[in-house]
Image: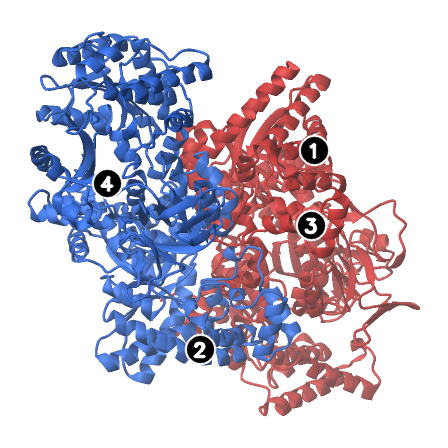
Chain colours: A blue, B red
Amino acid sequence: MNKWVYSFGPETTEGSAGMRALLGGKGSNLAEMSKLKLSVPPGFTLSTETCAYYYSHEKTFPSDLVGQVKTALKEVERLLGSRFGDEENPLLLSVRSGARTSMPGMMDTVLNLGLNDQTIEAFAEKIQDRRCAYDSYRRFIQMYSNVVLKMDHGRFEEILEDYKQEREISLDAGMEDHDWVEIVGRYKLGVLDHLGQPFPQDLDEQLWNAIGAVFVSWMSPRAITYRQLHHIPESWGTAVNVQAMVFGNMGGVSGTGVVFTRDPSSGENVFYGEFLKNAQGEDVVAGLRTPQMLTESARSATGSDIPSLEGLMPSVFQELKTICQRLESHYRDMQDIEFTIQNGRLWILQTRAGKRTMQAAVKIAIEMVKEGLISKEEAVLRIEPEGLSQLLHPTLDLNAVRDVLTVGLPASPGAAVGEIVFSADEAKVLKEKGRSVILVRVETSPDDIHGMHAASGILTMRGGMTSHAAVVARGMGRPCVSGAGELKIDYRAGTMSIGNEVLRRGDVITIDGSTGQVLRGCMEMNRMEISGAFSELISWANEFRSLGVRSNADTPQEARVAHSFGAEGIGLCRTEHMFFNNERILVMREMILASDEESRRKALNKLLPMQRSDFEILFEIMHDLPVTIRLLDPPLHEFLPQGEARIKEVAFQLGCDVEMLFRRVNELSEVNPMLGHRGCRLAITYPEITEMQTRAILEAATSVYKKTEISPNVEIMLPLILGRAEFDFLSSCIRQVAAEVESETGITISYKIGTMVELPRACLRAGEISENAAFLSFGTNDLTQTCMGVSRDDTARFLSAYVEKKLLNGDPFKSIDEEGVGELMRIGVERGRKVKPDIKIGICGEHGGDPTSIHFCHKIGINYVSCSPFRVPIAQLAAAHAALRNTHVSDKKE
Amino acid sequence: MNKWVYSFGPETTEGSAGMRALLGGKGSNLAEMSKLKLSVPPGFTLSTETCAYYYSHEKTFPSDLVGQVKTALKEVERLLGSRFGDEENPLLLSVRSGARTSMPGMMDTVLNLGLNDQTIEAFAEKIQDRRCAYDSYRRFIQMYSNVVLKMDHGRFEEILEDYKQEREISLDAGMEDHDWVEIVGRYKLGVLDHLGQPFPQDLDEQLWNAIGAVFVSWMSPRAITYRQLHHIPESWGTAVNVQAMVFGNMGGVSGTGVVFTRDPSSGENVFYGEFLKNAQGEDVVAGLRTPQMLTESARSATGSDIPSLEGLMPSVFQELKTICQRLESHYRDMQDIEFTIQNGRLWILQTRAGKRTMQAAVKIAIEMVKEGLISKEEAVLRIEPEGLSQLLHPTLDLNAVRDVLTVGLPASPGAAVGEIVFSADEAKVLKEKGRSVILVRVETSPDDIHGMHAASGILTMRGGMTSHAAVVARGMGRPCVSGAGELKIDYRAGTMSIGNEVLRRGDVITIDGSTGQVLRGCMEMNRMEISGAFSELISWANEFRSLGVRSNADTPQEARVAHSFGAEGIGLCRTEHMFFNNERILVMREMILASDEESRRKALNKLLPMQRSDFEILFEIMHDLPVTIRLLDPPLHEFLPQGEARIKEVAFQLGCDVEMLFRRVNELSEVNPMLGHRGCRLAITYPEITEMQTRAILEAATSVYKKTEISPNVEIMLPLILGRAEFDFLSSCIRQVAAEVESETGITISYKIGTMVELPRACLRAGEISENAAFLSFGTNDLTQTCMGVSRDDTARFLSAYVEKKLLNGDPFKSIDEEGVGELMRIGVERGRKVKPDIKIGICGEHGGDPTSIHFCHKIGINYVSCSPFRVPIAQLAAAHAALRNTHVSDKKE
């Protein structure tokens, strides 16, 4: 017999925190808290294996499940002294989803299950609160009808609105017991009307249908989207938690709330959260009512006059605080805890690792090490490298004049600029066109996920710091301002207004998620200041990693940023980028249009001093760190104008014949420029270009050495090498120029000659290439293009279909295609090292800044990665993760 | 002490035929013939190692060489009883080059060495022929001055012409002894005048300078060109043969000639050759005098009234015939023999394997097997597969009306059409522009090699069947008509005339090298009939080969040719070629321009019956042989018009909006179409195309089965597969359509699904792909492009520089780049076979018809090659070579 059901409660608990895969996050933590003897309503969990069975058996339950549920339910009844369906002392249940990893709001929940026309009266009697009982019944009918019977929410809201209008009641609080009784009647009629069948009165039917509906919600479109965004495997499935209900809507000493053990936005070690008096949990999450603060200090800081929990129920507050501290110590991580106060008694309904901003994550990890809670290794492993990019996100310039439209809650930090859109679909469409948008909603719901992902920032009218918008935005790293109550949004008209000010769809605004400000127009941005905690984290990461991290840098500005982040050198300096400025491109064109070697050399002589001075600056910035300079790579036609008008203009600038320029542009155009006359092929056909570049590099190094007495660490890199023959040919050309420069200056500059490995053939021939090359550097952009036969410029038409149909794991230009491109790299490393065991091997494609790819590079024994300057810290952290994951320390985060 | 010098002679001979690498072809055969006790003038050979020493020591000789030469020379003197430089009985020497492989006319020779003002009189006395002596002396001065002193030939010709005019002598035969004495004097003055130094009288100086000059001629431009054309390594070097002179110019019972043991043009087993009475060897080769026949039957066949050798000197003729038979049996191959008759005594100066036309080569090989001279394996190995393409060359249509301008000698078979050009340089220039030319010369010389190579055919006014033009043209497989004596050529005017008829540079003529006809204009061509010998050779090849040979065929015509050549199936049928005809391309465009799946399906439904009928015909032609059909491969924009005018025209044809067509053309254009939306990527995004093609294939197979009761052997091939995911996705799509067709027709057609392997990634993933694929077929064109990052369309700008600088072995699109592309193939075969040991693996790139690549395919264990129909026999023969070379039989040809 298979075990499908795991009980939890004050006496016997079958699960534990370690059983997350089987019981889901919620279920395993309910078990763990029960074991800790915290005040958790008893219940049981249907395992994720049950979900797997359900989907592999045409949505049916295993035959032995019914018996196991009955047994578990009996135990709950025994503990509480009540009975499910009992007409005197009925037990009410909640039925909730709970996957291995948190998917907030993505799946369905049914509360107050166990009510019908028979049990409702007993329940009212039992809780001595007829109003609360009928309120609960109508909530149950609404929720069950929506989740199980697939009726629209709006239907019930209409009924309620109509009733309120009839009776001229404005707020729910104005509804009395008989009003809810009437509503229950109308709701049931609504169901009958809609389905042609009465609302089900059979409680077993209710329970099993609710369980089935939760399983079904695992495959709802929004759950699927969420999983795709977060790379959660479909095969995991969800568990279902069936638990005795507690009620936060039982009057003035009842309530429900959410608490974080530390501030999830800043990471500060303060008690942080919200609650609503006399409410059920859904009211907090939905953001329909503005919540109350937990602490007095938070209340006074916001200037609110609504009392805090600390003020209202000081002893419950103290108990909650103690439990929070205990849970954080127990789990060794910041917790996000749901609680309900029923008639003055505190119940804990859920605990989980709290979602947090990246800034908070870093601060919390660092402080927990200092508090002795976790090790440095754990701290480093807790920070997702990719997430650091948020910290490197722009913030608003502090000195800029701000035209503030309104202020809401600072729900997710960072700033964003974009056009106003009012629907998630529109956000997605515009994003795909490359536009930046701010999604403006009254409030967000799980149906808006795709739009929130597409938006640069999110602005809502309603909802607090733990509303759906705030939680999701923080998780996604999107700036968010929530609860901007002054806003009036008219979806139909496509406008939002603040007082008399009306903004329309397409108007540009800026939001500052760190202050809650909403600003007119496009504001100047700054990169965020790197905090002390951040530096500390990176310094620990640097202790653990074995991979070197360099930066790609073509300009002094980039080199300075790279150096400030601790890049251990420049791994790729693309010399062609130096030719693209206005003055130089003219000389470059003169060189390209030269009809013979002599005039080509004349133009190259003009370029020489320009290149030399560029290199001088780079060498000075990098001191004695290696600077890898790649010789000219792109096909020459990239430097020529395209289109009649531009060609004529350039011919005029150059003072050359228009016809001739047209002809030359035409001659140089290629069918497949990616596979054309570029890379070292240019150097082979025009060795004078290589000679000029070599001279510029070595003269620059000589002059810097004279000035600073530091000898630059020069590495000359040849692009697009096929095998040893080209390498040898060009390195002898370089050595000859070097000898000339040396004899002219009397100063010996040591330099290395190495090569890009960016063609499959170069990977295969890495052995022979390594005989003479001082270093190899994988150019994984081009290697991906050639290995897979995919032009990066032309993937748009089919790549998404490939990812959708699961024919590829993802965009191979983002993370290295390990099975293909990675295999070639593995071969290249192996063959290179066989010939020269200590040859230095790097990677300088954009993959060098991608954590997944960095992990792969670590595994295959590459020496260093080189990435864009602002990704250096990400690469440093990712390299540390790779080192830690591949040695003794395993990730304790889950 | 190193041995540099190898003697040969009637008593002791140090070399043999097997020492070709060391002694060169000529030297080793002189040694071999000496051992056979044939009448060979004694002498000695300076080995190729001496040449290597010479070039690696700044053109100096090894110190011990002088002594060895002296010793060897003494032996020659002893044998002949004369002495080099003796003023009473002087020994005269020839100094000739002789590389490992024959390079006719490419290097230098000095004859009659040993004459000076002292020895000339003794020599005249000795041979009792003062006229012959002084004729020899003037020849020596001219040759030595040209070869060693680098004086122009023309200088001496002028002197001779002036003298003849003074004395009113028209022919050399009119020159008497005192005339030659006078000429010798004028020649010596000419040298003094030109060099400021007298003609050297020191005989040792003469000898050593001549030896050095022969070594130097190894690096002459024309020798270098010849080696490049024939892939002869520079490192081989040449040997130098120093041999006692014999004289064919000693009067009426003297002469010199060349004989082939079989007809080098037709291969017939007849005694074939030419000689000149009273002449030196150079006179025959240069084609300056029209030669005499050897046999009476040849003389009467040509209707010549000049006596044959058989008629003139019957006993010498018989002796020659016997020697020829002996040499052919000894060497087991057709021989090309040089002889000289000095005063009635026959001397053999050289034997070597005779160059022959491909037709002759096949016939000789087959007949030698029947004569028991060689084995079948040897016969097969003797035919260079690439050479067979000559036999598949066009010949003139026998039924066409021929407008014959004149008739010369049928010097090299086959027909050619082209524009008249009068210089080798012009031939080369026009050829590079893609034009076909006939090179017309009075006679050709080694300086014309590049032009002969560039020309489609060669026509000369002078020279016989063994003239330079004839020998070289046969070797190159170029049709040639030589000795067309009616022609008058005026280089300066750029005309050639026959009687009153004047043709100019650029006029088109046709030459028929099999009949000697020169025809006006462009004649209709046929492919040559395949002879019985050819069929026999191929049938033997088929016995030996283990590689299968299929053909690429897209049309019924191609399929029929392939089938007639015995192709074992179609290895690649490119379905897209079926869409390019006028009617279909419109429907294809309709499909491409469809805005949704429905209208796309509508257009596809129109294409379905067209494709189906194509496949029906192919299946009928191929019976039960496999027909591998590749699904649509090229990017869709290839089917759309380019350029404004064409776009407008097509919009009108299709009745669609011009703007829309422009937009669509633009949308579909790609930066790197080779790496774009093509191959199976089209099938992934538009599965309906695959569905249509699958349906067309299987419906066609069904209908052919119904008609013929032969079940077609259907193989469906997916292009541009990256890995298993795409393969599985598309094969399930194909299987679904197959099931539909089966249920509609009630007939089960068995079919295989396999894939192209044309991306590096596919080679690496060949293991997983093979799990479900029935076959793999390497697409080496695309694999070369991606492995090397080289677009075939864009190589023009750098590939020649690469080949020149020896950075690549050759054009990788001609022969597989074994180190790169081949390595990927090796990996692919290994990984595929590891998963499925019996998986069928083929190659269908153009390399499938290249002998070198076929050899490689055999080595790595590929099952079959597929090539263009007319290359099927070449592939069959190459496959046999590969099998024979890789097992027990070694090539005995050399």
Chain containing the residue with disc 3: B
Q: Which residue is mark 3?
A: B641
Q: Is residue A392 left or right of residue A145?
A: left
Q: Which residue is mark 1?
A: B607
The answer to whether residue B232 is visible is yes
Sort mark 2 into few (<14), some (14-19) or many (20+) by Cα contacts within 10 Å: many
Q: Which residue is mark 4?
A: A355
Measured Cα–Cα span from mark 3 to mark 1: 19 Å
Q: Which residue is mark 2?
A: A607
Residue at the image point whose x is 43% and y is 34% from the top: A806
Measured Cα–Cα span from mark 4 to mark 1: 57 Å
From the top left corner, tell me how far across and down residue B683 is, in percent. 56, 35
Say whether mark 3 and mark 4 are on the same chain. no
Measured Cα–Cα span from mark 4 to mark 2: 54 Å
Quadrant hosting residue B80: bottom right
Q: Is residue B105 left or right of residue A76?
A: right
Say whether mark 1 and mark 4 are on the same chain. no
Nearer to us in this view, B593 or B462: B593
- Name the element at disc 4: loop
